[in-house]
């Protein structure tokens, strides 16, 4: 097979090596050659490691290529692989970091372009990685699963600090960021200059107008925790959309009764669903649906998931009826004024969030259809603070819901002032939902930062007892 390299004179290649090495060794450590650890045609049999601020770099330049190998991280360790390094530019960066979903950027991420927050690899275990670059298309896989599929558009959006993250050509480098990361079996296959990914058939995202890339460039977590497989949306479709849009999806079934879409009825179905999605590049959530779910499912089964959320769109009305307030025919005022009904709805919300151990309050502050026009009137400061009190007490996150455009920015600001954390969610009805537009608007309007966002490592539900507060019969009775 003919070798296909960046066709520049040897002196120019060496100059690129020196320039890239200078960029990547700002802390003063000498850059060693990577050439002895990476082979063409067959995996290198060398096992080696890299520590914080150490850098290895190839003297050879590459444009199109497939780089594969294995890595092993330890707790808190991180390294990055760089490609298309050029003089005065540090190129694209692929992150290798594992561990819990704590807000840190995880293995396989194309940094600041496609950041990932759940890793398909574990600390202490060897895992496979592959980076394939063909023309403008970059595909990154971890343990055989594609986690990034990015095609750079003709006019990519880049902030000043990331302007160098562009398709080009240049050396490949490995740099340690923290702790020790081990490598073995590195192998590179140079590809022809006209190589194309025949499976890359979609038009690139228009980054001149795309909101996702703007948040990715700020390393602001772009996670939609509230995606349901319903209305024609399948696991495979959600996977493709997540890759294409650059949004981390948290895919969650409804566990309970009375909801729309796939409903899990018992622990057996919970475990079966978890096994379906556990190896896919989703965050794995579950929604407690109806008001009997805490009786129906064991905490052991629900704790398999990364997070759990519920809402107050289903209440028990004053006559003991299950009332889904998003269905007008189930909203019974029974002689109450709407102000009185609003007080009752707030009391139900407080009771739900106090007694049902959820991580996230979803579809927040939703009102029945005939009350929505007066949302700001009904949601007084006193009522808002009753709900926020419970979120503070139990460490529950407040969802910013893109589909419903809830809660209002006023309530988001009040929650931020009280130190409440936030998540993004779509609560899609079908496969045609947006790209978190209202969430981005709210972040900008309320000046939220990454530090305001919730991650599963912040969960406190394991500390909370399940209170059977509605006098339903518990499971097995």
Image (spheres, rainbow, N blue to C red):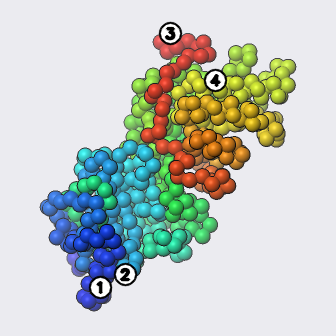
The residue lying at 25 percent from left, 59 percent from top is 51
- Residue 12 showing in the rendered view: yes
Gap in angstroms between the C-alphas marked 3 and 4: 23 Å
Residue 87, label in figure? 2
Q: Is residue 295 above or below residue 44?
A: above
Q: In terms of sequence position, does the residue under pointer 2 or pointer 4 come before the other?
A: 2
The residue lying at 42 percent from left, 51 percent from top is 104
**Cβ–Cβ under 8 Å for marks 2 and 4:** no
Tag 2 secondary structure: loop
What residue is shown with label 3? Answer: 477
**Cβ–Cβ under 8 Å for marks 3 and 4:** no
Gap in angstroms between the C-alphas marked 2 and 3: 71 Å
Circle 3 packing at 10 Å, graded few (<14), some (14-19), many (20+), is few
Whether residue 109 sits left or right of residue 220 in the image: it is left
Tag 3 secondary structure: loop
**Cβ–Cβ under 8 Å for marks 1 and 2:** yes
Residue 351, label in figure? 4
The residue lying at 60 percent from left, 52 percent from top is 448
Gap in angstroms between the C-alphas marked 1 and 3: 76 Å
Gap in angstroms between the C-alphas marked 4 and 1: 67 Å
């Amino acid at each position: 097979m003919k070798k296909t390299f960046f066709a520049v004179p040897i002196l120019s290649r060496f100059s690129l090596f020196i320039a890239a090495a200078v960029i990547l060794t700002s802390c003063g450590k000498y850059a060693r050659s990577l050439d002895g650890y990476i082979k063409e045609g067959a995996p290198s049999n060398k096992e080696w490691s890299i520590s914080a601020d150490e850098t290895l770099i190839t003297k050879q330049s590459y444009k199109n290529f497939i780089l594969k190998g294995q890595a092993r991280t330890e707790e808190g360790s991180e390294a990055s692989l760089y490609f298309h390094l050029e003089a005065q530019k540090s190129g694209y960066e692929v992150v290798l970091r594992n561990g819990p979903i704590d807000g840190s950027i995880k293995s396989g991420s194309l940094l600041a372009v496609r950041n990932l927050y759940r890793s398909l690899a574990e600390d202490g275990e060897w895992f496979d990685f592959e980076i394939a670059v063909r023309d403008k298309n970059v595909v990154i896989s971890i343990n055989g699963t594609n986690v990034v599929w990015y095609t750079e558009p003709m006019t990519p959006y880049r902030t000043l600090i990331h302007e160098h993250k562009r398709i080009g050509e240049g050396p490949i480098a490995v740099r340690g960021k923290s702790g020790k990361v081990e490598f073995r079996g590195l192998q590179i296959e140079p590809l022809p200059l006209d190589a194309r990914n025949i499976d890359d058939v979609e038009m690139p995202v228009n980054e001149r107008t795309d909101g996702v890339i703007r948040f990715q460039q700020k390393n602001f977590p772009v996670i939609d925790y509230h995606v349901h497989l319903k209305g024609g949306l399948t696991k495979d479709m959600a996977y493709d959309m997540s890759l294409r849009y650059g949004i981390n999806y948290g895919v969650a079934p409804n566990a309970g009764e009375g909801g729309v879409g796939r409903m899990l009825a018992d622990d057996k179905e919970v475990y079966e669903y978890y096994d379906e999605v556990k190896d896919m590049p989703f965050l794995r959530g579950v929604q407690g649906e109806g008001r009997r779910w805490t009786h129906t499912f064991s905490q052991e089964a629900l704790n398999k998931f990364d997070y759990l959320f519920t809402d107050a769109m289903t209440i028990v009305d004053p006559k003991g009826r299950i009332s889904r307030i998003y269905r007008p025919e189930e909203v019974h005022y029974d002689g109450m004024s709407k102000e009185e009904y609003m007080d009752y709805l707030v009391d139900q919300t407080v009771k739900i969030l106090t007694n049902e151990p959820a991580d996230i309050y979803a579809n927040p502050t939703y009102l029945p259809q005939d009350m929505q026009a007066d949302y700001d009137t009904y949601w007084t400061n006193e009522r808002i603070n009753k709900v926020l009190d419970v979120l503070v007490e139990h460490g529950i996150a407040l969802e910013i819901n893109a589909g419903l455009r809830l809660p209002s920015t006023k309530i988001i600001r009040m929650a931020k002032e009280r130190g409440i954390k936030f998540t993004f969610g779509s609560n899609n009805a079908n496969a045609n939902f947006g790209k978190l537009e209202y969430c981005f608007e709210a972040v900008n309007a309320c000046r939220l930062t990454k530090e305001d966002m919730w991650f599963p490592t912040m969960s406190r539900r394991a500390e909370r007892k399940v209170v059977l507060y509605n006098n339903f019969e518990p499971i097995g009775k």
